[in-house]
Amino acid sequence: MENRKNIDHLFQEKLEHLEQSPRPDMWLQIEGRLAKKKKRRFPIWWIYSGAAIVVMGLLLIPLLENKKQDPDPFRTTDPDITVSPKDKEDLKKSKTKETETPLPSTKKKTPSLLPKQQLEEVVIAEEYVPKKPTETNNTIDKKTLEKERLRTEVEFTALLSFPADEFNVMSFKTSALNSFIKTKKEQPLASLLDVVQQQDSAADENSKKKRWAVLPSYGYSKAASFSNTSSIDRSLQENPVNGDYNSSVGVNVSYKIADKWVVRSGVYSQQMSYTTKDIGIVSGVISSGLNSVNQNIPLSGSTDFNSSGGVFIGSSSDAQNIAAGLTSATLVTNDAELQQVYSYTEVPLEVTYLLKTHNEFSVGIVSGFSTLFLNKNEVQLKSSQYSSALGQANNLNSVNFSANFGLDLDYAITQQWLFNLNPMFKAHLNTFSRNSNGFQPYFLGVYAGIKYQF
């Protein structure tokens, strides 16, 4: 430990007067670094602060000027005051007095910087006191309001009742309406409710005048059946049966009982015919004939039948078998037809419900029934060689009924003349009395005509 202290002391004594000068190039480097002084940067937020102060000053200057000019910012410079003519004369007199005498204390309070017009308005506002409405004013106001209401009502009523044929948007003039209103004013005053009631009553009268209608029509129908069997004989159940096209002519009379309901009836001629095909004819055979036909034997107008024998009429297959089995039998034809024709005098009773009514057209649903009176009953035998009446059906009822359903379409030609289209479906209910093989006829038809309303 003592040796260490001596060593330290020794170094201290030796290095106490030691001096060492730096190299010359070191001074040059130090001098170069001292020459470069740090540049002081100008704070950029000072620029933004200055710009904000300038903008705020520009915004505050007009407010400060307004405060200097108008110490009372809530005072309205343009009061909306109505002054009567008498008050205006008093005001002129007060102005003349003001030129001679100084203003009262209230006028001295007004700023001297106000212009002359504003100064006059301030004087008017201070001196004018609105008067309370009296009873006479109220009565006058009520009378004027009542007159105005009546005048407006008259004009509106006149405009509603102005003739439509005289109104033209392109050439309409207010003078025409004014003259019309003048004539209406001379007449007794009618309220709007009265006008509406008059128009409704006029419409009702018009509708009442046109409740009746007469319709001559022509119909075209197609006969058919729910069962594809022949009603002439049981042996012809396998033979094909087709319904034929027929025509119908009649007159229909209708009466409108309500806005949506129409009852109609009339008289029509209705014809129906059915053709049974694949019929064979054999001569020289004794036959009992067809069950449902009162047959005329021998057939008139035919030279192909043996007068000494009978005639067989049936399906073509049975005719061929008979002709092949009997030497005395002769096959006349196996491609003949039996046509059954019957017609009725129809009296319908139907009701129409109008679904859509318009000035030009209307659509309705028709339903009802018809009573049919038989006036023609005929069965004809036809082939490529001849055609003759075979007889009459013995199973037809003289009175028949049908269920009717269809549509009724009207298109207005004029106010009284309409074009009518009437598609109908009619199913016969009791056409045959017996031996009909379940034959149930119906037909689809379309009737058209010109309807006259009155």
Image: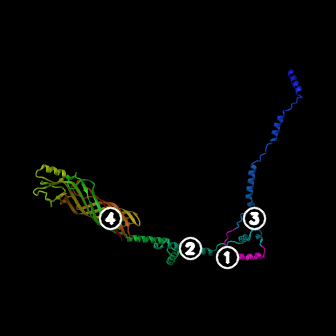
Towards the viewer: 364 or 125 = 364
> Of the residues shown, which amino acid type is indicated by label 2?
Glu
Q: Amino acid at mark 1?
A: Pro
Disc number lying in front (2 or 3): 3
Is residue 90 inside the magenta stretch? yes
Q: How dense is the environment of label 4, judged by Cα within 10 Å: few (below 14), some, or many (20 and up)?
A: some
Measure how far apart labels 3 and 1 are at the Cα level: 33 Å
Q: Earlier in the sequence, mark 2 or mark 4?
A: 2
**Label ID, residue 448:** 4
Where residue 77 sits in the image (x, y, percent)? 71, 67
Q: Residues within 10 Å of mark 2 (few under 14, many from 20)?
A: few
- Compute the Cα span from label 2 to label 4: 58 Å
Q: Is any atom of residue 413 visible in this view?
A: yes
Give the magenta part as a residue range. 78-102
Task: Say which element carries label 1.
Answer: helix
> Please, is residue 301 above or below residue 414 in the view?
above
Which is more N-terminal, label 1 or label 4?
Answer: 1
The kind of residue tagged 4 is Ala
Pinpoint residue 211: horizontal percent, then vertical percent.
Answer: 37, 69
Give the class, few, some or many, for how many residues have Cα within 10 Å of label 1's Cα (few <14, many ≥20).
Answer: few
